[in-house]
Amino acid sequence: MDMQNSQTSQEWDKTFALSDKVNHQKVKYQTQYGFEISADLYTPKNADGKMKAIAVCGPFGAVKEQCSGLYAMRMAERGIVAMAFDPSFTGESSGEPRRTTSPDINTEDFMAAVDYLSMREDVDADKIGIIGICGWGGIALNASAIDPRIKATAVMTMYDMSRVNGNGYFDSADSEEARFNARKAMADERIKASQSGKTTAGGGVVDPLPEDAPQFVKDYYDYYKTPRGYHVRSGNSNDGWHTFGCQAYANTRFLYYINEIRNAVLIVHGEKAHSRYFGENAYEYMTTGKAEGYDFVRKPNPMPENKELMIIPGASHCDLYDGGKDKVIPWEKLEQFFNVNLK
């Protein structure tokens, strides 16, 4: 399951410095769909025996050299084997066309990461968790609802990509007419791609930044388009998804069963994050079986006592990518959460 690829960069090309408390290596594993996933594995120095492990991914459209790698490295500093991976079609992982996405394939990316970690000699297969950041927060919840091997899930500054693609931000396009117009636009793009034989990039974070851009767009620019978080392989930093790359997310709602997650879940959001409603609604639905933005009503969670919502005062969406200027990522809370629930 551990494959080598000469095309994988061996240089340190992250947006953060390598900690002297961890060891780092490149690894690869394969999903059940045949995609080869490229990952960075961080292990605590002087570690011994079988350890707790986590897989980390996100944000949606980012690469492992950005904040998912930072999260993995910081958790390895705290004694956990941690792996940040590029999703299928993204970064150094395989899949064509590039920068496309799929709810089932992305969920499988997480579960295949659990497969890989569980086979390692330095990992206790009964002590594996995941961290999902931004759009990969929703995907992490979906994976946890499917796979009980995931004993603990931390969701940071989450988006529900199926909801935002189908309903628009703040459900502003939650109507048959709006969805029809969006479907027609993507159908037109598919015709263009069929005629030309290639997809067209949809564009990453807007550049140059308009003076009247919403604050959350300015926050994205400050992370993805500046030395703080720019990376050459990141879709968000460059040309983004192709024009119908997220089409599959628009017509699905993949958090239907999160009210049945028995294992531990921690949802963390910034107080000032534009995306806060995704996390708050997901937490409410996960625990009670009903919430704003969820058309369906189900039974309350059988184990609500190990579910938690944490709001970081004053923090924006992107502050939870790398901590922002105030270093707001709750590392001690994450360490405690995984230590308590991966035992």
Image (cartoon, rainbow, N blue to C red):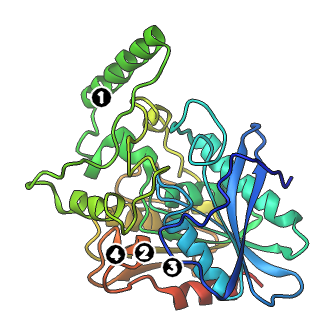
| Up/down of 255 relative to 318, above or below | above
Q: CA distance from mark 4 to mark 1?
A: 32 Å
Label 1: few (<14), some (14–19) or many (≥20) C-alpha neighbours in 10 Å = few
In percent of width and height, residue 285 lies at 47, 62
Q: Is residue 258 above or below residue 304?
A: above
Q: Report which quarter residue 78 is drawn in.
A: bottom right
Mark 2 and mark 4: Cα distance apart in space: 13 Å
**Residue beneath disc 1:** 176
**Is residue 41 found left or right of 247 in the rendered image?**
right
The amino acid on which the numbered mark 4 sits, given as a three-letter code, is Gly
Please name whichever residue, 221 or 261, is drawn nearer the observer in this view of the structure. 221
Q: Mark 2 or mark 3: name the one nearer the start of the chain.
A: 3
Query: x and y percent of residue 209 in the render?
Result: 18, 52
Give the residue pinned by disc 3.
Answer: 308
Q: Residue at x 76, y 61 (%)?
A: 114
**How many residues crowd mark 3 within 10 Å: few (<14), some (14–19), many (20+)?**
some
Q: Specify whether residue 146 is in view.
A: no
